[in-house]
Image: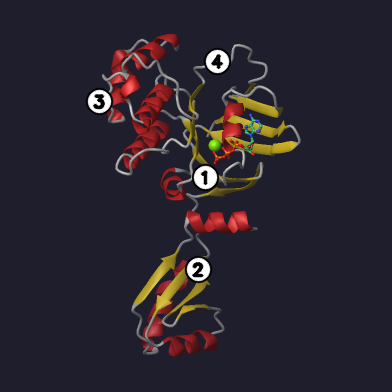
Amino acid sequence: MEEILKIKDITKVYGKQVVLDKVNLSLGEGEIIGLVGPNGAGKTTLMKIITGLIKKYNGDVFIKNENIKENIKHDTKQIGCVIETPGFYPDLTGYENLLFFSEISGLKDKNEINEIVKKLGIEDYVNKKVKKYSLGMKQRLGVAQAVLSYPPILILDEPTNGLDPAIVPELRKFIKYIAKEKHTAVFISSHILSEIELMCDKVAFIQEGKLVKIENLKEVKRDNTTIAFITSKIEELRNFFNERKIEYKILGEDKLQIVLNPKHLEDLVLNISKANIPLRSVYEVSESLEEKYLRTMGE
Ligand SMILES: Nc1ncnc2c1ncn2[C@@H]1O[C@H](COP(=O)(O)OP(=O)(O)OP(=O)(O)O)[C@@H](O)[C@H]1O
Ligand SMILES: [Mg+2]
């Protein structure tokens, strides 16, 4: 996977406050990375630095191995972004705005604009004047504008902010499509952790300006999984595990969990049955992103 974006030791200070503290991150072609963290953690600031909206900072941002500090004209075709409320011409329609932006970015093909409009599901209102748009409508038009020229990097700061829940899956599908089919590297922030979990390959946790952890969400754990058992005979099951020196954790009056290699699970269940211990349910427990978030931020 080709590296598209590299962030190296980014530090940003406002007055006495260190807003970003030596942040390092790398983003590959077609990869979707989520950025999560509390209010004021530095997410928007980091995104503004990458897109060139903030020019004073320490450290370096490389886009396709080129330092953006040395790229004086800052090639706008390299990055598409939606940061805070996108600015449009209010007296033009959404479509006219898209046409305008496509012309300044050197894209002439109207079919591509139409395709994006259709894929994002904004045909219904794209011919209305932007001043009549709601926040969510503007937000979606912003995403359309950001991807107009299919830039290699897409930066989205809380793109689902203000969107009604029925639209969110559509936007998610679109972002996945852009990453997969157009090989766009996507860097996206959100407070909706379930959203990030469904969309991203990796998630970066930021807290008080420090990137505290990067977790791979697509990694399949082969050797160790947590398995929960539910039974009305919890005492018997505890004895069963005690006799075999298998460690367990009690989760409730009819529920416990163990950690084991999944390839031993079938045999184990068979032996529990042979010991006449009835099982109501056996399932793999995976930690939700919300649980990971609370654990990571609590540390
Ligand atoms: N122009 C500025 N001048 C001074 N301080 C600023 C400025 N912009 C941001 N900050 C501070 O930098 C810190 C990080 O802000 P930032 O907007 O990056 O946070 P965030 O992670 O995007 O938060 P949120 O989740 O609320 O959007 C905050 O403490 C904020 O007060
Ligand atoms: Mg922000």
Give whichever of discs 3 and 4 has the lower sequence position: 4
265 and 24: which one is in front? 24
Alpha carbon separation for disc pair 3 and 2: 50 Å
- SS at badge 3: loop
**Residue tagged by mark 4?**
75
Tag on residue 202? 1
**Residue tagged by mark 3?**
123
Alpha carbon separation for disc pair 3 and 4: 30 Å
114 and 15: which one is in front? 15
Give whichever of discs 1 and 4 has the lower sequence position: 4
State how the image is colored: secondary structure
Give whichever of discs 2 and 1 has the lower sequence position: 1
Give whichever of discs 2 and 4 has the lower sequence position: 4
Q: Are marks 3 and 2 in contact (CB under 8 Å)?
A: no
Dot in front, 3 or 4: 3
Going by the image, does 158 lie left or right of 116? right
Which residue is depicted at the point 57% across and 84% down? 245
Where is residue 79 drawn, in percent x and y? 51, 23
Q: Are marks 1 and 4 in contact (CB under 8 Å)?
A: no
Residue flagged by tag 3: what amino acid is it? Glu
**Residue tagged by mark 2?**
261
Residue flagged by tag 4: what amino acid is it? Asp
- SS at badge 1: strand
Alpha carbon separation for disc pair 3 and 1: 32 Å
- SS at badge 2: loop
Which residue is depicted at the point 46% across and 43% down? 200
13 and 62: which one is in front? 13
